[in-house]
Image (cartoon, rainbow, N blue to C red):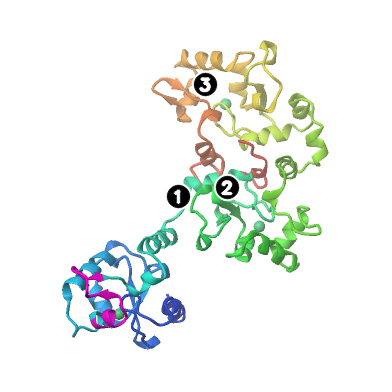
Amino acid sequence: MGKQSKNNKKKKVYAKFKGHCAYCGVHRPFDEMTLDHIIPKNKSGSGHEDNLFPACEPCNSLKTDISIEALRIKVIKMNDLTYPSYANGVKNGLIDVSQNPQTVTFYFERFMSVDDVMAQIEMSTVKIAEHIQQKLYCRYEGHCAYCGVSISFNDMVSEYIKPLSKGGKKIVENMNPACKSCSDMRAELSIKNFKNLIMLSPDSLSYKNAFENGLIGEEFTCYFQLPKMERLAKSMGLPLNDIQSIQTLREFCESKPNRIYKRYGGLCSYCGIRTSFEEMRITHGFPVSKGGKDTIANIFPACPLCGETKGELDIKEFRALIKRSPDSDIYDKYVNANLVKRKSIKFFWELPKTKRLKKIIPCGNGEPLPQGELELILL
Ligand SMILES: [Zn+2]
Ligand SMILES: [Zn+2]
Ligand SMILES: [Zn+2]
């Protein structure tokens, strides 16, 4: 960390209690104040400003590498008015000597509880797990939740809808996938203020993207605020009318077969193997001839081998067929794709969404998708 940013960090920490030591409450000039790691370094406490308290020198050397509660006990036991921290504590009304045992309240506890402090540290230091990021990424099929631009997984920033500093929770329901521009512009703003800021920043990338996606009118409508059908239409690059007027999926497949191709990112929905558009077959999970419905839930893109082997079989019969032919090419295919576990066969579309995404999006072992295809994945 550079000297400048180190100094900036110290300024922020110093300002936490307006120049007072977080423990004994004594006021110290900036240069004499030290920074204390709330969770000690040797307990893997980080150097993040949320884990730092301003402390006078005597308090800091008293706390060394112990916890807040251990420090409290140390002060109670000390009972020594010649030690500055103790004397300041008594003078500032933080140590009640009339009690037995004496009670110690730290200066920072006038503003926040120890639990609050700990919660804040945890929020600023815990990294968001990759599987949560993947979930987030597919929430809007790879689009920024604000300006609607299509982003790659690696460029996605996980945003908090209600910022943590304003009491927002660190849960996936409180997160949005965002492009860098929107994330930078939003910072800690409320959605309402962020929307106003976008309208006032016609030169920004976010405004430009939002405009291209038809999100700018009298005011800016965030991509995630659109009705689901409108988002679907936008991500498919189709007019809303087209989406609404689709009668059957069969009809849809015939007029827009590439949309079905992209439903599983160009992978066969049965074996998970990448298949070219020309070779892709469209199958009904339950054949229409056996009463299967012609709806999106029953449409499965397939590689030639899976498509031809399945034919008019239903899912159960198809699975049984693969299972009883352990010497066949198709069985090998499922073994290689890791879809055979203890002799039972799982189809690619039956895997949990995050596992499928690992294969589809370029963050797992899967091959990267050709550009522009991600936006059409409907898992
Ligand atoms: Zn102190
Ligand atoms: Zn954006
Ligand atoms: Zn296949």
The residue lying toward the viewer, choosing from 287 and 170, is 170
**Residue 357 x, y percent position in the rendering:** 54, 40
| Mark 1: secondary structure | loop
- Tag on residue 129? 1
Q: Residues within 10 Å of mark 2 (few under 14, many from 20)?
A: many
Residue 106, position in %: x, y? Answer: 32, 72
- Marker count (numbered): 3
Ligand 2 rendered quadrant: bottom right
Using residue 10 as the reference point, say whether residue 40 is left or right of it: left
Q: Amino acid at mark 3?
A: Ile
SS of the residue under disc 3: helix
Identity, as a three-letter code, of the amino acid under mark 2: Tyr
* Classed neighbour count for the residue bearing mark 3: other residues with Cα under 10 Å, few (<14), some (14–19), many (≥20): some
Examine the structure image and report whether residue 94 is included in the region drawn in magenta. Answer: yes
Residue 108 coordinates in the image, percent (x, y): 37, 72
The image shows residue 233, relative to residue 321, as above or below, that is below
Q: Amino acid at mark 1?
A: Ala
User: What residue is pinned by disc 2?
Assistant: 137
Classify mark 3 as within 8 Å of ligand 3 or not, answering yes or no.
yes
Above or below for 135 versus 254: below
CB-based contact (under 8 Å), mark 2 and mark 3? no
Q: Give the residue drawn at x 75%, y 41%.
A: 233
- Give the magenta-colored segment's residue range: 87-103
